[in-house]
Amino acid sequence: MFLQPLLSEMSDEEAELLDNFFTPKSHGEVRLEHYDASKLIINWFDTYPLSSRILEINDHRDKTWASSFIRLYEEYVKNRTEAQLAKKLAEENEYLRNQVALFKRKEFGASSEQFTSPPIEVEDTATNNAAVSLSTADLANQDKKLRLVSSNAGRKPLPDYLPRERVEYKLPIEKQICECCSGKLREIGEEVTEQLTLVPAYYKVIQHVRQKYVCRCCDKFVTAEGNKQLITGSSHASPELLADIAAKKYYYGLPFYRLENIAKQSGIPLSRTNMANWMNRLAERNLLCIYELLKSEIRDQDIIHADETSFQVLKEPGRPPQSTSYMWLYRSADKASKPVVIFEYQPTRSKEHPLNFLTVGYDNKFNGYLLTDGYAGYNKLPNITRVGCMAHLRRKFDEALKILPAGAEGSQAQQAMAMIGELYAIEAKIKDQPDKFKYDVRQSQSLPVLHKLKLWLDEHYPNVLSKNPLGRAVRYAVEQWDYVYRYILDGRLAIDNNIAEREIKAFVIGRKNWLFADSVDGAKANATMYSLVQTAIANQLDPQKYLLHVFKYLPYIKNSKELESLLPWNVQLEESESLKIAA
């Protein structure tokens, strides 16, 4: 009853009067609607239609009772307001504490989302043979960065294709005498130890000399044909130099001012302005045709992963330098026969950009599966089936789990993480299986887990606080559920969008070094060059060797068929030029 907290302040007479007045008793919200010298009107809202009582003030008893009620009601309103304020402050305090705890974990704690749950069985639905048990602890390797291939531990032999230089060590002639019998020592073999060394890079000038000829009879002059320049005019940049600059900027993430300092150490006047102009010119005049072919190829595929990240462009027309621009990424599926990675610069994060890239203004419009994070800009693209990212959903619950005190067991965040862990454990087991096999296993084993997780979300959604990390995780999962579960619809689909996040990290790491793009041309050059570099890596090619190959042969290209021969999956480099990468 609304008067319950005030009973201790009421006299027995006041309590009796109020008890007689409120018939039936009110357990809902009570409001004082009107009070004057002749009438007191009270409404309460626990029933429908609205319940109310009217007290006519005719004598001293009624007036005393009304005064008592008004005093208690004012006290009640004051206490209720203070209680509501205290509750609000407590919620905000909890929210801020959770944020501080989460920031501390991100800054100083482990970044792994590893979570251990009971082992599960994955059954081979094709052969009806039970597979080996595995735990979700096996998922620790799911989100690791790309790394160079390594086999078993121990020292590995150096590659055979590296040149060898022999340094022989022999005993002096005077020591080729046996210490025991003074007999002459004879060579019976050798012991070889290999040591890897480095020959520092050096600059040299190649003079292209074209001989001139003249006819003594008619004085006609002829000059021998030389090599074709990638950048025409008075540029000193050779394909080797341009490939080296591009690889260091877009693969190793070195800004131009550092490359300028590196060249200065060798006495080379290589300015950052020239290097920037060379890259812009390459992207705009030379490599744009390859970039457009890559864009056309990815739209022809059935599955695309998409992501976006922000960066700064200083000189955008009509926008202040502090404006936020975006680099959008589109990536082929992990097992695509022709892997493509496309970066596209756009000044905003508008949903029109993925719409235009995928469906508008091109002969080949994408109409397959699009795997993304929870950004609403990817919703409702025509003829496209959007698939959500389970890793983002898991990350929300992981954040809720990380703010729990040490030793906390059985929390709601742990329950959700355990179910998500089951899904990832199934994916870890079938990762290298055929697509049909993946589809069958997901339908028979992943689908029941997804159903259980959905029931759990529906149960807890009404009861969690919106600002609480767990509440945000549950709300995100409910809102994204129609997209997240769709990976089970096709065996070719991935459970998450991690492959796109790994690709866009190359741009993010570079952005931390070079900070911003000076102009729109520079931003577009970034998109083109990062696209070629990451596509080369996706096709198991060394990006510097691939760029060198393109820069050497591009000036001699005569038609579209020859141009297609420069696409990464059509390029055959030597074994020593390949970059073997494992997920």
Image (cartoon, grey):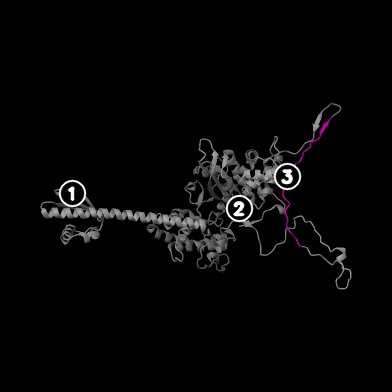
Residue at image position (69%, 48%) is 545
The correct choice, above or below, for 190 with respect to 145 in the image is below
Q: Is residue 155 left or right of residue 115?
A: right
Magenta stretch: includes residue 213: yes
Q: Nearer the viewer, mark 3 or mark 1?
A: 3
Looking at the rendered structure, the number of numbered marks drawn on it comes to 3
Residue 203's label in the rendered image is 3
Q: Residues within 10 Å of mark 2 (few under 14, many from 20)?
A: some
Across and down, in percent, residue 384 comes to 51, 48
Q: Residue furthest right?
A: 183
The correct choice, above or below, for 410 with respect to 290 in the image is below
Secondary structure of the residue carrying numbered label 1: strand
Where, quadrant-wise, is the N terminus in this rendering?
Answer: bottom left
Q: Tell me the amino acid under the disc marked 2.
A: Ala
Q: Main secondary structure of the magenta part?
A: loop
Which residue is identified by label 2? 336
| Of residues 579 and 368, the one drawn nearer to the viewer in this rendering | 579
Q: Can see residue 390?
A: no
Which residue is identified by label 1? 35
Q: Residue furthest bottom?
A: 180
Q: Tell me the amino acid under the disc marked 1.
A: Tyr
Marks 3/1: CA–CA distance: 96 Å
Q: Which residues are magenta?
A: 193-214
The correct choice, above or below, for 223 with respect to 422 in the image is above
